[in-house]
Image (cartoon, rainbow, N blue to C red):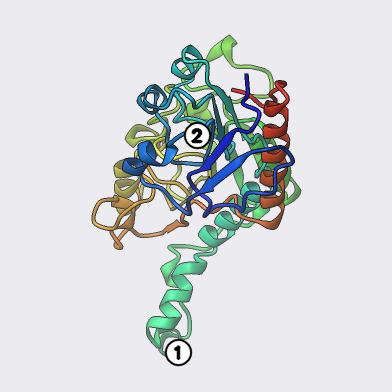
Amino acid sequence: MVPETPHIVCLEECHCPVPPLPFPHTYKGYNKTSHDQVPSRLGEADIAITTIVPITCADLDAHPRLKCVFVWATGVDWVDIDGFRARGVTVIRAPQSNVDTVSEHAIAFYFASRRRIVDMHNRCMASDEYAEKRTLTYHFGGPPLTCSAEVVMIIGHGFLGKRVQALVSALGMKVLIAERKGMSGSDVREGRTEFNEALRKATVVILTTAKNPETIGLIGASEFETMRKDSILINVSRGGIVDEGALVDALRNGEIGAAATDVFEKEPPVRGESVLLSGDVPNLIVSPHLAWFSVQTIQNLQDLLLRGLVAYYNDAPINTV
């Protein structure tokens, strides 16, 4: 039973302002929270709001009052679902809150990668090479493809994957929806393409899949060897799905043409620790896990938090895991 006046703790206000809640409660918010700070900050919380900072089963055991965790995000890969259920803790998430924004970020990554926009900008700012040589086209390794010549492999065909499919199709690209890795022959579903076949044909590979035991390490050295040398890998899903070391090797060895990622195996990444931030990886674009960030996503998140917590307070929870 939800207390008449629950105490709510938000561990990460830095991502999105918490909207006013229309039921009796007390509230404590923190701009950001490290893993080590979680136990002390949960305090006497009945409800906790977090985004990417995990709350563990050990935290639940130390805070028996905590009976609801609102994960203010689409992905809940860090949640020990069985452990939370065994302790009677309700987990609520914010589904489909960022589909439009993340899909558009994937398209931005595509154009920036295929047209080498970041590299060309940096070269223009760093020297007078353009003025001296009159062209920088030789840095491309050949003329880039246009949209009508692209073959896009989409890995993960949920709401996000379907939205990416709609956008790239509107741009005139051919789409291959990847079957699950390891499935072949008669097991391949209608409308899907066998995983390795799609890898061989694709000029662009876009990851929009969830992170789970089946997808961790999904793309590694073997997959990069299979991909076309002019292909682009775009990851707007989760860190850990792509083997970062293998990706760096593939870019340095010219096994693929370019890559762009919004996510990292360990977040937030630190220079000197993350191989993706070594500074000498060619044709790599990174962004700091902000593909979700837009006016629309903020509005969606606030609406989902409001509706989710009101429903939980009224003992009729929605969007539970």
Residue 137 in view (yes/no):
no
Mark closest to the chain's N terminus, 1 or 2 = 2
- 103 relative position to 71: left or right: right
According to the image, label 2 marks what residue?
45
Q: Given this view, does label 1 or label 2 mark the residue nearer the observer?
A: 2
Gap in angstroms between the C-alphas marked 1 and 2: 62 Å
Residue beneath the point at 72% across and 33% down: 310
Residue beneath the point at 41% across and 59% down: 283
The vertical placement of 37 against 288, above or below, is: above
Residue beneath the point at 36% across and 36% down: 39
Q: Amino acid at mark 2?
A: Ala
According to the image, label 1 marks what residue?
131
Image quadrant in which the C terminus is located = top right
Other residues around mark 1 within 10 Å, as few (<14) / some (14–19) / many (≥20): few
Picture coordinates of residue 150, whole percent (x, y) = 61, 48
Q: Nearer the viewer, residue 99 or 126?
A: 99
* Mark 1: secondary structure: helix
Picture coordinates of residue 17, whole percent (x, y) = 61, 53
